[in-house]
Amino acid sequence: MALLEVRDLRTGYGHVPVLHGVSFSVDEGETAVMLGLNGAGKTTCMLAVAGLLRRWGGEVLFDGRPVGKHQDSRAMTRLGVVLVPEGRHVFPGLSVQNNLRLGAWPVRRHPRKVKANTDRVFDVFPLLAERRHQLAGTLSGGEQQMLALGRGLMGSPRLLLIDEASLGLSPVLAQQVFQAARRINSEGVTVLMVEQNAGALSLADRALLMQKGRIAMEGSGADLMSESALRQAYLGAPA
Ligand SMILES: Nc1ncnc2c1ncn2[C@@H]1O[C@H](COP(=O)(O)OP(=O)(O)OP(=O)(O)O)[C@@H](O)[C@H]1O
Ligand SMILES: [Mg+2]
């Protein structure tokens, strides 16, 4: 069953449209990967789903229920939709531990859940446990990305939206981020990842190609990997 369903989503900035009717769904338990070039509208789509950007039109359904146009990011977080934003946005002057605590906002009234989520984050990212007292601003780029993912997990997400987690990381670190996403998904969290790195297709139960504010292709990760059109349109290789 679809945990997230997006139908004919239209939005943009000011008077400039960016998404021209985007439709897709993500089933509960899946990892979906959305690929697309710079400026295709991937982040815009994530922001609209996370309630950080108003929809101009179309519908979003979460767990079968329509999400109102005025449901903001707080409301979405309460439903279990958590965004790990592009650019990480960790709080540099706060320790690793305090950054994680901020991520626990949706479950702050349930200390046992906060503790269980912290244990889970430290289990998935042992490095964060080692560095729990270090200021986030002094972590390396890869470590900050792990922290951003860990902070997302602290909110007990049902759907984790991960926007370009591999951006600016070495191939080895990008693989580590993908492995972490796989692990998170294997523990029952549905994942929607935005990527420019086609290596993420190996994780994808469902793959989507965003082009100029529209979903240009959809299939399994393997389908999209073998699509000559994808290679031509997205990777720039001959068909
Ligand atoms: N805050 C904003 N104000 C005005 N236009 C914006 C804003 N944010 C994004 N845009 C425009 O919307 C379009 C889509 O941008 P978006 O950030 O969604 O692309 P993207 O697919 O995430 O790209 P990238 O891979 O570079 O992150 C671009 O033309 C961009 O210039
Ligand atoms: Mg983006």
Image (tube, grey):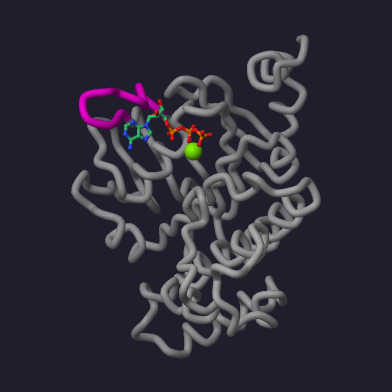
Dividing the picture into quarters, in which one does residue 139 lie? bottom right
Most distant residue in the right direction: 172
Q: Residue at x 56, y 52 (%)?
A: 191
> In the depicted view, which residue is nearer to us: 102 or 116?
102
Quadrant of the image for the C terminus?
top right
140 drawn magenta: no
The location of residue 224, given as percent across then percent down, is 69, 27
* Residue in the picture at 48% in, 26% down: 40
Give the residue at x 43% y 46%: 4
Question: Residue visible at 60% across and 63% down?
Answer: 144
Position of 206 relative to 143 (above/below): above
Label total for image: 0
Residue at the outermost bottom position: 112
Q: Is residue 151 left or right of residue 174?
A: left
The furthest residue to the top: 239
Magenta stretch holds residue 17: yes
Q: Residue 200 location in percent, x, y?
A: 70, 42
Give the image location of residue 158, x and y in percent: 48, 61
Specify the quadrant of the image occupied by residue 227.
Answer: top right
For this view, does 65 lie left or right of residue 136? left
Residue 63: x and y in percent read: 39, 53
Give the prevailing secondary structure in the magenta stretch.
strand
Magenta-colored span:
10-22
- Against 141, residue 56 (above or below) is above
